[in-house]
Structures are given as structure tokens and as C-alpha cells.
Image: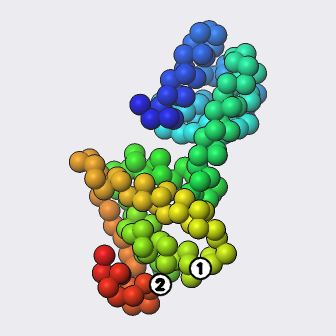
Amino acid sequence: MNVPCFYGAELRFKREQAGLTLEQLAEGSFRGISFLSQIERGERRMPMDLARHVDHKLGTDGFFERRCEEAAKARLVGHPLYFQDVPDLEKQAETLEEWGPNTIPGLLQTGAYMRGLIRYGAPLVTRERAEGIVRARMARAELWKREDRPTYWGIVREQVIRHTPLPPAEMAE
């Protein structure tokens, strides 16, 4: 069971234990019933404001807020905040379509390519941070090893292939 599924199941258990419907739990949260339902099914992560609301409504003594903080720290290891839900959504996708106007799309990048991008595009990033970003990128590519992997369509500009941050021998990988 992955982390979102675990916390979703825990949310459902605590909600039902408290005798609340999704509608009752959502009341006053600025979130809809379908959003809460997706969290309970492990399809979405719980945002911090909702975690505080849920803890208050269910009397869970900060359980969900603490888990959101832990999850946020884990996500920030290698992905920017605006991208935090994408890796989970990619795992659920049947089809992925990407356009790479300036770089090879992330799911197709190798560790060497990513390091080259960081070296030339963000030279002040520390080695530890760079390796965290590379690990996160490579973890996303694990979906290619699955038997039920999504169909993939990628479009890149010719310039992206011809002018790269790597020498041709490394780019061939």
C-alpha cells in the first residue's frame, strides 16, 4: 500500500468511526466531497489546510497535519512545489503526452542528462540537492518497468536533440 492510500484509508476509518459522512466532514473546509473522496481512495494528497480541518473535526490530535508535514518534506526532496502531484498522477495515467520545447521530457531523461541540465542551467545548486533532484527524476521513470505502464507520446524540437548539455557519447544513452 502506498502512502496516499494508507492515509486515505486512515481518513475513511477515522471519519466513519466519528459517524460522519463525506459531506459532514467537508463542511467548512473549502473543499468538496469529491476532493475528500479522492483522498480517501489514495488518488490525491491531503493539503495542509484540509489536514488541520480534518484534525479539528475528527479530534485526531494533529495526526493528519503531522503526516502532511512529513509528506511535504519528502516531496520537496526532488520536485518543485508546483509539480508535487505529478508523479502520483503519472502512476495512475493510461496515456501520457509531453512536449519538450527546451529539454528532453522528464520521463525520458537519464541521470547523466539531468545532471548536465543542472550543471549548465543551475550551477549554484549544491551537489546534494542536485542528486536529490536526479533521484526524484529517476524514481518517476520507474513506471516504465511496470507491465501496465501508460502509453506515451512525446514531442521534442530538433534543437533539443542537436544542442544538449552532454557530449554525443553520453547523449546516446
Tell me which amino acid carries mark 1: Gly
Q: Locate residue 132, reporting x and y percent.
A: 54, 59
Identified at 60% across, 16% down, the residue is 14
Res 119 quadrant in image: bottom right
Identified at 68% across, 39% down, the residue is 69
- Depth check, front residue: 105 or 165: 165
Identified at 67% across, 24% down, the residue is 63
Q: Which residue is mark 1?
A: 121
Q: Locate residue 80, reporting x and y percent.
A: 61, 59
Query: Pointer 2 and pointer 1: residues touching (CB < 8 Å)?
Result: yes
* Label 1 SS: helix
Q: Quadrant of the N terminus?
A: top left
Tell me which amino acid carries mark 2: Pro
Q: Which residue is mark 2?
A: 165
Identified at 63% across, 22% down, the residue is 23
Q: Is residue 41 left or right of residue 147?
A: right
- Can residue 32 be seen by looking at this rendering? no
Q: Locate residue 42, reporting x and y percent.
A: 49, 34
Q: Is residue 130 above or below residue 58?
A: below
Local crowd at mark 1 within 10 Å, few (<14), some, or many (≥20)?
Answer: few
- Depth check, front residue: 24 or 53: 53
Q: Locate residue 81, reporting x and y percent.
A: 64, 55
